[in-house]
Image: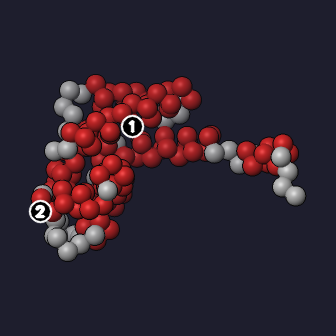
Amino acid sequence: MNKEKKKESLQFLLAAAKEIFGEKKLLGMLVAEGAPKNMNLVEIVEDEKLRFLHLTMALKNSEIFLNHLQIRLKEMSEMAKIMEVGNSELIEKWLSDECKPCLIEHVVEGYDEIYKILIELDERLLWHGWPLIGKLHDPIE
């Protein structure tokens, strides 16, 4: 996988982790795995000297994060399957893996599939016609 794809998938994972733990605790977890203390999340992702493995290790070692990721992937897979978008079977395969920390690797390697599903779900659920229907029902004066 090229550097840009890895960076993109890492941004996705760190954004999710930031929502779960908050930026301060997440930074502490990353520092414990070798990230510099004087950087913010954006700088950490952009730093070419940091090894990708060290950053993902903080997430692999967090049972809380892995549980959240597993739940979100399961929900995404179920919605994708119902709406017949993307490759829900691939996500189901990841979820059937007994190695929970391996979910991080699956997300990193298969981020393109996740992104496709998210885009397709967004296009279907956030249909541009919804505001028009709202205006017809309750017009703004």
User: Vertically, is 90 above or below 21?
Assistant: above
Residue sitting at 22 percent across and 69 percent down?
Answer: 48
Residue beneath disc 2: 34
Q: Quadrant of residue 74?
A: top left
* Picture coordinates of residue 101, whole percent (x, y): 20, 39
Callout 1 secondary element: helix
Residue beneath disc 1: 72
Q: Tell me: 63 left or right of 69.
A: left
Q: Tell me: 83 left or right of 108.
A: right
User: Vertically, is 111 above or below 48?
Assistant: above
- Looking at the image, the residue that sits furthest to the right is 141
Q: Amino acid at mark 2?
A: Gly
* Picture coordinates of residue 5, whole percent (x, y): 34, 56
Sort mark 1 into few (<14), some (14-19) or many (20+) by Cα contacts within 10 Å: few
Q: Amino acid at mark 1?
A: Arg
Disc 1 versus disc 2: distance between alpha carbons? 27 Å
